[in-house]
Amino acid sequence: MKVQEKIRRVKEAIERKKAFDVTILDLRGLFPFSDYWVLCSGSSPIQTRAIAEEILERLEEVGVRPFHVEGEDTGEWILLDYGEVIVHVFRQEEREFYNLEKLWQRARVVYSERDGLDLLHEIG
């Protein structure tokens, strides 16, 4: 499956479960293990787990399974590793604490719900 399709399915699942502050970073050339990170927030561990489950289901429908899943037990920060796409589902407080966008500020932002930016059509 092409990376654009993975990201599209992840974004649809995130929207379906009412995640907020969705950001997609292009890490090509900066991070050796993946090309894109999708970050989103939920208001509680129940919501973050529901978001992660929806993502897992939407991708499994087309035969795509993660290489690794971490954090589902607590729901504070759930990581879904799909190779070139890694999804980070945070409880808002954890997202603010770890602030991955600042840590990886050299990454190109291709989607930001907060800033009204949508460059997803440029993903290739």
Image (cartoon, helix red, strand yellow):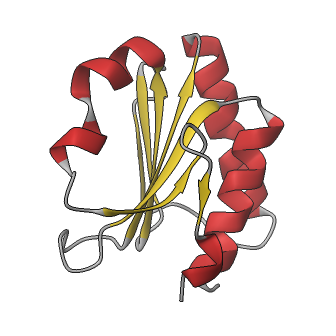
Picture coordinates of residue 29 (x, y %)? Answer: 20, 80
Image quarter of the N terminus = bottom right
- How many numbered callouts? 0
Vertical order, 107 against 53 (above or below): below
Tell which of 10 and 26 is nearer to you.
26
Q: Position of residue 91 (x, y in %)?
A: 47, 18
- Residue at left offset 25%, top offset 18%: 97
The quarter holding residue 103 reads top left
At 69% from the left and 53% from the top, the residue drawn is 11
Q: In the figure, 73 relative to 2: above or below?
A: above
| Residue occupying image coordinates x 55% and y 13% | 45
Q: Answer yes or no: is residue 64 visible.
A: no
Q: Residue at x 27, y 62 (%)?
A: 107
- The quadrant where residue 109 appears: bottom left
Q: Is residue 52 above or below residue 117?
A: above
* Horizontal side, residue 16 vs residue 38: left or right: right
Left or right side of 5 for 93: left
Horizontal and vertical percent position of residue 46: 64, 13
Vertical placement of residue 35 versus 104, above or below: below
